Image: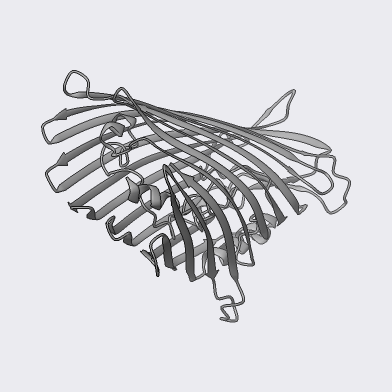
Amino acid sequence: MRFILLYIAIPLSLLLPATGYSQATLFETNPISHGPFFTVSAPDTLPGIWRNGNNPAGLRASGIGNSGMVRLSGFIESGEYRQIHQPGELQYGLFSAKGAQILNDWIVTGSIDLSRGAGAEQHYNARAPRQSYNPYQWVDTTGGDWTNNLVSLSGALGSPLLFGTLSLGLAATYDVMQGARQNNERPLFNYSRYRLTAGISHEAGSNEAGISFTYSNNSEEQELGFFNQLDTFVLILRGIGTFNQTSFNSASRTYDGVSRGANAQFTRKSESDLWSFSAGYTFFAEDVSTGIARPVPNGLWELHTIGSSNTYRRSSGRSYHEFNLDGDFKVGRGTDPQLNGINAELTATGFGLSYRYADASRFRSLGIAANIRQYDMNDIVSQASESFTLINLETHASRPLLFPGLQLNAELGLQLPANYSLSFRNQNEVIRRIFLPQSDYIDQTVFSSGLHLHYTWNLNSYRLAAGARIKQHFAPGATGSFTDKNRNFLGLHITILY
């Protein structure tokens, strides 16, 4: 447990990664152009029913004990390697509190995350982070600076072994976000999401099987209004090249989404080995409408996802070797109400392989990962399509320095665009303003390097950790210079572990 607590102090989850999936981002960075790269990190539980299957019934065997963490942190990120709807600069402060408690052999976990910050020089976006690939978006052509506030709550409950063979579990998360642009014509957005998971597992000797069910709901409202500038208008996207162009005195758009899914897991354990296999299916549907008194439908997006996560771990004393194999397949389609038919189609696949070694007695770890993602989106109406393949490689190493308590973590990453294609029949405003710059963003070889140094003091019943993290991304531009396109990150944190 001491090793787990010390590793929690490494703010890989709180400090902004390159993936764009971190809550610290607060703006939606286009998920299709990122994929899961530069994400090597330490798991917080043993592999198996809980981690691979996201089944709270597996908390009983997760290795979590009585523990807690309180963390204050802040970061600044800036650079020219960004999408057109990413801020040029981000400045954020974050507070996190997490804990786990064993009550009569029941395991209870909970967390709260609060963040507030600002993004500067953002164009063509007024959205909260919805990672759903939904093509039905609207964007205004007025750039600006934004502030955002996010509250995220989560908790889980896992039972002990009941009737000699069964375990039960429940988990819930709730996120609420608000944001506003700070310059003239201030559009607003607010976003809320909750997710419920219930699971059961059955143990028979060295084998354990489980099944879990998940339901989630998200709602977002965006406001655009009171434009008085002659060069301001709104692009309402209905696909890659299908769109409407208009202007509003005031307008509101809502996104209402529902997701349902199920996941099955199987785990086999021996004295030193553990195998875990997991497979699941999720269906997501999101309605888009514009207007308050008389909302007008603007699109229905449906997304089907099949995924699998598999782990093998070999333990010896306080060290282990772990191999992970993950994959997913997505199929999406969008129904345009103006056409009363499907106008957008998506297929996306992802595959990842990773290895991790950790030695708790020496406070050392090593991680290596490789993954590949293929994305294809077709706009039937405008006869436009976007397709790419990204290969991502990364490595992470951690070891003590000079004297006990001082820990160094180093990261290296590489993203290779193996294939990219953007085809369209006619170039229009959306192609010229959004998708051509996006193609330039995706079609880049990206190098990443990072260092995190932190020191931990042992103070009786708790530990105090403080550290700093720096990270840089380099994407050679048209000139081939590493200074042409880059992204820099600096974060500081102070953490109490008990």
Identified at 12% across, 45% down, the residue is 271
Comparing 218 with 74, the one in front is 74
Picture coordinates of residue 443, whole percent (x, y)? 51, 67
Looking at the image, is 8 positioned above or below residue 294?
Answer: below
Q: Can you tell which quarter of the image residue 1 is in?
A: top left
Q: Residue furthest top?
A: 163
Identified at 46% across, 34% down, the residue is 284
Question: Could you tell me how many numbered marks the image carries?
Answer: 0
Q: Does residue 257 appear anywhere in the picture?
A: no
Looking at the image, is 393 positioned above or below residue 478?
Answer: above
Identified at 15% across, 40% down, the residue is 268
The structure's colour scheme is one colour
Picture coordinates of residue 146, whole percent (x, y)? 72, 48
Identified at 51% across, 45% down, the residue is 133
Left or right of 361 in this view: 384:
right
Picture coordinates of residue 476, whole percent (x, y)? 55, 76
Left or right of 439 in this view: 405:
left
Q: Does residue 168 appear anywhere in the picture?
A: yes
Q: Quadrant of the C terminus?
A: top left
Picture coordinates of residue 465, whole percent (x, y)? 48, 53
Left or right of 443 in this view: 1:
left
Looking at the image, is 374 positioned above or below residue 488?
Answer: above
Comparing 398 with 186, the one in front is 398
